[in-house]
Amino acid sequence: MAEKRGETEKLTYDFNTAGLLEVFVPKLDGWYRVTGREFRSFDGLRRITVPTECRLGTVQVPMETFEYWGPVFMFGTNQEMSYTNSGSMYTGKIWDSARETSEKRG
């Protein structure tokens, strides 16, 4: 379906997308979970939480959280942007199109 919308570029994910991805939103003064697509485009504090070990039948899983200082990309593209710590996402035409589609669905 993405090809029909002209989104043929494979996005670069240079972090563990299986981890818990969170961004710090200064206006709301807290950490919030996001998808990998939003995580790579967020210009602010970002962190990833991953389990340190996994054992079958273990309920208490030890976790490790670390800050992520990788590149910031324009939403939906591989265009690298400069980090300014603005606490918001780098958006563009693809973001506007995705928002429009989402609003139409209700």
Image (spheres, rainbow, N blue to C red):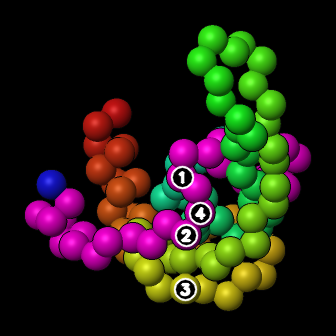
Gap in Å between the C-alphas at discs 1 and 4? 6 Å
Residue 17, numbered circle: 1
Residue 18, horizontal then vertical, whole percent: 54, 45
CA separation, marks 1 and 3? 18 Å
Crowding at mark 1 (Cα within 10 Å: few <14, some 14-19, many 20+) = some
- Indicate whether 46 appears above or below 79: above
Q: Position of residue 104 (x, y in %)?
A: 29, 43
Q: Is residue 23 magenta?
A: yes
In the image, what residue type sits under mark 2? Asp
**Considering only vertical position in the picture, is 51 above or below 34?**
above
Evaluate whether residue 87 shows in this view.
no
Q: Residue furthest front?
A: 55
Q: Say which amino acid is labelled 1.
A: Thr
Q: Which residue is mark 3?
A: 80
Question: For mark 4, does the 10 Å Cα neighbourhood hold few (<14), some (14 to 19), or many (20 or more) residues?
Answer: some
Q: Give the residue at x 44% y 80%.
A: 78
Callout in the foreground (1, 3) = 1
In this orientation, which residue lies closer to the viewer: 23 or 91? 23
